[in-house]
Amino acid sequence: MTLTSVPTDQDRKMFDSAIAELAGGESAWAGMSLTERADLLGRVHEAVAASAESWVGTASSVKGLDPDSQLVGEEWISGPNPVLSACAVLAESLRALAQKKSPLEGVKFGTAPGGRVSVPVLPHSAYESILLHGFKAEVWMPPGVAASTVRSHAGLAAHRPSLTHGVGLVLGAGNITSIPPLDVLYELIANNRLTLLKLNPVMSRMKAVYEKALAPLIAANLLRIVDGDGADGGYLAHHRGISHVHMTGSAATHDAVVYGPGPEGQARKAANTPLLNKPITSELGGVSPIIVVPGRWTARDLRYQAEHIATMRLHNGGYNCIAGQVVLMSRDWNQKGAFLEELRAAMTRTPERTPWYPGSGDRVASACESYPGAEQVGTGRLLIELTAADNAQTMQTTEYFSPVLGVMELAGSGRAFLDAAISAANQDFVGTLGANVIADPKDIKSMGKGFRTSIAQLHYGTIAVNAWTGVGFLTAAAPWGAFPGHMLEDVQSGLGVVHNALLISEPERTVVTGPFRPFPRSVAHGEFALFPKPPWFVTSRSAKATGRLLSKFAAKPSWARMPAVFAAAFRA
């Protein structure tokens, strides 16, 4: 973004007009009851469902996917599907508040280490308890926050619907197509703020899709959608009609928005004199660790978890802010070599795809330059086994945002290894958006309460145990964002949260758990999961059909629709 350049006169007039129209819609929004807002979300839900086919088709085209590829399933599962879920749960929360109830009414809270209250958010419905059987998620609140406070404060700005907060700017993500609509919904419902959504240039072809899917919000003068370049984003961020900025992207882009670009911006950052004179929230990336606790695994366990890690890195081509980037393994694990061979094989057999996100090739080349021993595993994919002679800091502090996976070794086993890996992730890795832990249930059980005590020391916004943190992203009721506490001048993975359809106030983190290996091994371990392989796995042979059916189910939930979902999933 270059704040020294400016939009054309025509673009400025268009932007000014859009902001004025939104400002004119603010009074109508302020006068809309919570029930009317829930009804509006119902109409958005219908519009998203009606737009789903064109949404996925356009997104697939943007990313260079063959329409017949199973990878199209990613666009269903991370596109319209989570937006449909968010509309439904947000509407449910508003209806509860309209009846003077908490969105958490009737929810049975638990406890977490350190005097924390935990709030179960997955499964949130009877449907989810079947479709995602074996997967759970809970929100951990900060230490000392009482359960009564959690319940009464849930609702955020919807507690005072007539107190609106102006027009906000959302600088949309360029990688996952559900992110811009989800951010718009959260701004509107959780923050009582109307939105001007500026699309990332990479996603400019999605504009017509979004306008159709979010048409009820546009018709009510609650949303306008524009596209443009960095100069346009800079103009809008500093526009006097914009009260707040929310962005998804990199820490570098965040700093350019807040302090300005180039050396002058860096000097302002050093002096802590931001150019932006309004609040900003953000969801940024980082270097996400994958902690593999050594154990005694079967050959199928090794293969499954290798595919799991390949998914964490290669989903969406590797262009995810939540992509796993560094595997932390024990050098003392006697199955280390066998697991690395499975990991190579999994990354190699994952379907090839076009490196569609701008700059990917340059970032892969940079990784090769930093690590000459990098191994090509498939076209354009790197597996980097760091040795004692390598400079680990580059891998720990560079978000490659491309198909680059590093492997680091630490000493130890059991909880001693887990704690050492957690310490390394907290101290050495940039960002706090998400961390993954893989451990056999019997090894977790052997640690007793100590396992959750160790997890409490892992300072990340979403932690996934035997699951990918992407499950937290896809869970409508779960907050999504960095671990709290970052400052504007050291933003790391961002400020604030999004999604959070139960409107929980000031959550600390989300903890997701899944089955170590689904059916049939999960049955023997008491963690029964119905899917033989999750449909978001990059190696799933039925991802396209399953993803489409899951989205159709989210559009119109029905027990009668469920058998078709499982029939597709079992072809994985």
Image (spheres, helix red, strand yellow):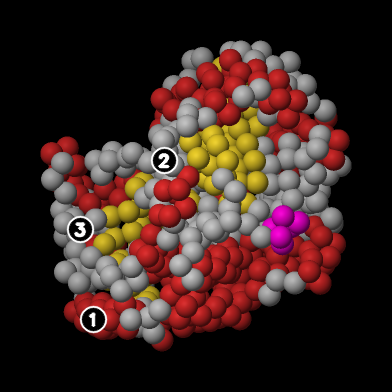
Distance between the alpha carbons at the discs numbered 2 and 1: 41 Å
Q: Main secondary structure of the magenta part?
A: helix
**In the figure, is residue 1 to the left or right of 460?**
left
Q: Residue at x 84, y 56 (%)?
A: 571
Q: Residue at x 28, y 70 (%)?
A: 163
Q: Is residue 80 above or below residue 506?
A: below
10 Å crowding of disc 3: few (<14), some (14-19), many (20+): some
Q: x, y percentage for residue 505?
A: 40, 52
Mark 3 and mark 2 in contact (Cβ < 8 Å)?
Answer: no
Identify residue for label 1: 20
Looking at the rendered structure, the kind of residue marked 2 is Val
**In the figure, is residue 60 to the left or right of 251?**
right
* Residue interval drawn in magenta: 126-131
Front in this rendered view, residue 572 or 500: 500
Q: Which mark identifies residue 278? A: 3
Looking at the rendered structure, the kind of residue marked 3 is Lys
